[in-house]
Amino acid sequence: MADRDSFAYLDYNATTPPLPEVTAAVAAGFDIYGNPSSVHAAGRRARAAVEQARDAVAAMVGVTPAQVVFTSGGTESNALALKGIASASVFASAVEHPSVLAHVATENLIPVDSAGIIDLVALDARLSKAPSPALVAVMLANNETGALQPIARVVEIARKYGARVHCDAVQAPGKMAVDMGALDVDSLSLSAHKLGGLKGAGALVLRSGLEITALQVGGGQERRRRAGTENVLGIVAFGAAAAQTARLHGAMATVRRLRDDLEIAIVRVAPHARIFSQGVERLANTICVGLPGLSSDIQLMRLDLAGVAVSAGSACSSGKVTPSHVLLAMGVPESEAKCAIRVSLGWDTTVAETAQFLDVWRGLASSAAA
Ligand code: PLP
């Protein structure tokens, strides 16, 4: 980070600064230039680095290394699961990340309640009539609100109908422990840059023995599940970050206290502000707050000018802020959804950073009230 003394980075759900262990592993990794598919010594060295990282990622989610397929990140992992796992119909919760929603017909979206939690009765009803085998995608933690989905109940319902479950767990590791065996899902998406690794590396973790059809073909890499020379440096960084998650999770109790204190202060300063999904189990680091009367793009700009980085719902790719589909699915009126921002703390967020946010927020609250 350029200058965390004057700059408050409160956008960890968008991406995280690389961990020092990652920076060190990457620096050393520049010497590992061989192609992991080459049989000579340089290739074997690269292969060993990739497999060491695979071991760390597998250990992070409690699986065997052969279950881990390295990809370019969460978006590709979701595509590979939803396209590559054989199914006759695909369903998803209405609050999934766009990289999941892109693969699901609108009529197959399962509604959520006002806190963003999937409607299990609706899921059961839809699966009971769905062409079999169905595939259901439900995320572990929502990127905008932090709300945690009841994956165990989703799996239980899915199994009644012989359906498979894909879980986008991209937002979880680094903020909470993830055990794929305990979740009992068929596939799990991970992304390195959300847990202190680098952008452009991730994994799809598969239930042992589950066959998938590769999307990217033309090479035997990743046990024929994902062709193309591996992103060795990105994978090395992913492994280095994965090895640190227990430490990051240890920091979450402090992060939760900082977050909770900040939420109290936010509402004290702006009593008309609404914090979404506050009443349900959610990630310790996330605040999704609406400030009626002041659009999220204005809030974002004013915060940015004051050196505070946050997001408006899901990151807007076209530079245009549209109301968050997550908040709309939760029944939040469009006018209110357009005034929501996401503040996401991280393992090294300081009190000074949250205070910097609060200083600007005070001004925003009085503009909104004016
Ligand atoms: N899924 C969720 C829940 C996310 O938050 C993100 C990124 O914001 C993705 C998937 C996409 O991951 P990536 O940026 O690695 O493609």
Image (tube, rainbow, N blue to C red):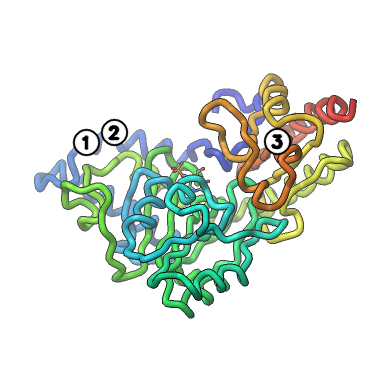
Evaluate if marks 1 and 2 touch, with contact meaning CB atoms under 8 Å apart: yes
Rendering coords of residue 249 (x, y %): 58, 55
Query: Looking at the image, which residue is at 54% across and 54% down?
Result: 172
The image position of residue 75, as x and y in percent, is 42, 45
Q: Report the number of discs.
A: 3
In the image as oriented, which residue stretches furthest toward the top?
305
Classify mark 3: residues with Cα within 10 Å, few (<14), some (14-19) or many (20+).
Answer: many
Compare marks 1 and 3 and give the one earlier in the sequence: 1
In the displayed structure image, the side of residue 142 where residue 35 appears, left or right? left
Q: Is residue 343 visible?
A: yes
Disc nearer the start of the sequence (2/3): 2
Residue 338 tag number = 3
Measure how far apart labels 1 and 3 are at the Cα level.
47 Å
Q: Which residue is mark 2?
A: 30
Q: CA distance from mark 2 to mark 3?
A: 44 Å
Query: In the visual, does 361 lie left or right of 370?
Result: left
Amino acid type for the residue under numbered disc 2: Phe
